[in-house]
Amino acid sequence: MKIEFFLNNECVSVDADPMQSLLNTLRGNLKKTATKEGCGEGECGACSVLFNGQLVNACMMPTAQAEGANIMTLEGLRQTAKGQCVIDALLEAKGVQCGFCTPGMVLALYALLNGRSDPTQHPTEKEIRTAISGNLCRCTGYGMIIDAANIAATKGEGLW
């Protein structure tokens, strides 16, 4: 089945099984490999993408749901000033170790910072922990990722 949607701000058309996971379509058909498969059950966040601006697990979504949608992966997000701000903050805070969870963490932090009603108000630690709670990291212990959220909020003032 031919499915058309916007991927990283470009219109794409893909011939795929409509019930195939969006993750498999992104990785296999469209070669967007920053989106990872970790658990395949929507528990780890490695497959996170922004779907019409909302953070979702691509492993749990059938490709058919992408019809007409706007999907952003890490490949697209890193081409934006806001996305690069989050990536730079993670690097500065040493919030990247093995890197497997990093794409999902970047998208989760971006969604948190971009979705605030008052961008001058920095998120609390509880808000940050809630925002990244769908992403599992076995290396950092999350402290450095929380630091990165604060760095991105500070250095990104005016972007958000």
Image (cartoon, grey):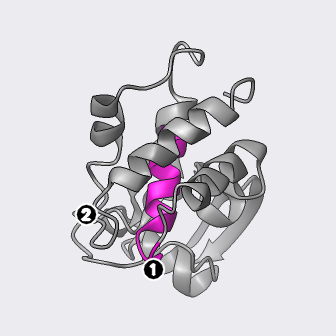
Q: Residue at x 46, y 35 (%)?
A: 112
Q: Residue at x 45, y 69 (%)?
A: 22
Q: For residue 91, say whether it is visible.
A: yes
Identify residue type, mark 1.
Answer: Asn
For label 1, the SS is helix
**Label at residue 24:** 1
Counting other residues with Cα less than 10 Å from the Cα at mark 1, is it few (<14), some (14-19), or many (20 or more)? many
**Label at residue 42:** 2
Q: With 119 as the anchor, is 112 left or right in this view?
A: left
Q: Is residue 74 above or below residue 84?
A: below
What span is in magenta?
97-111
Q: Residue at x 58, y 48 (%)?
A: 69
| Horizontal and vertical percent position of residue 158 | 75, 23
| Horizontal and vertical percent position of residue 134 | 28, 53
Identify residue type, mark 2.
Answer: Gly
The quadrant in which the C terminus is found is top right
Q: With 39 as the anchor, is 8 left or right in this view?
A: right
Q: Is residue 136 above or below residue 157?
A: below
Q: With 33 as the anchor, is 131 left or right in this view?
A: left
Find residue 152 and report its image quarter.
Answer: top right
